[in-house]
Image (spheres, rainbow, N blue to C red):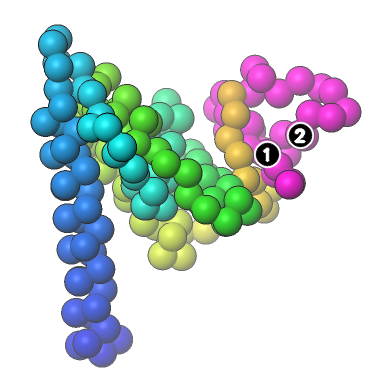
Amino acid sequence: MTRSSYWAIAGMALVVGATLATTLSAVAAGRGAGGLVRAPAGLEVTNPRICAAEAVYRLASADDFGLRAAIAQATINGYRAAGAVPNCAAGVTDALSRDFSPARWQLALDAVDAVMSGDYSVSPGACARATAVVPLATVRPAPAAPRAQCVIYNLAFVEVRP
């Protein structure tokens, strides 16, 4: 990589970091009685990195990098399939209001970054192709239900086709 490439990457990292810091500051400033977080009206968070990290933070119940990476990959695949990143402000607000763990958030970001950069490849292929993650208990053996080709802990990684 050239020196200008490093500066471009550093600049992008600063923009993403500043966006997250601004968002988290705005949410934290909205703390109400009892320390509950209230998102400012109209807050939108549609950054794929932040929204995928929120999904990892919410769904990964075990301390397992492979699990976190599989959730990140499925979430990013879902965004690609939908053609957009949904507003995850409510999820970020919820994460901040329920015993937020900065270390756990960083682990979620690390998994998302590894998947997005290509430094980590999710396997097997059924897990890598998944576009949604659902609790295994909700996957019923019905013809119309998506087939769970990949199961990690109590989560089913499924391909949902439009």
What's the CA distance linking mark 2 and mark 1? 6 Å
Establish if 3 lies above or below 6.
Answer: below
- Disc 2 crowd rating (10 Å Cα; few below 14, some 14-19, many 20+) is some
* Mark 1 residue element: strand
- Indicate the quadrant where residue 99 lies: top left
Residue at x-position 88% and y-position 28%: 143
Residue with the mark numbered 2:
146
Is residue 157 found inside the magenta-colored segment of the image?
yes
Q: Is residue 126 left or right of residue 16?
A: right
Which residues fall within the magenta stretch? 136-162
Do we see residue 127 in this rendering?
Answer: no
Q: Position of residue 80 (x, y in %)?
A: 57, 56
Hey, which residue is sitting farthest right in the picture? 143
Q: Do callouts 2 and 1 mark residues in contact (Cβ within 8 Å)?
A: yes
Residue with the mark numbered 1:
158
Q: Position of residue 82 (x, y in %)?
A: 60, 51
Residue at x-position 21% and y-position 62%: 15
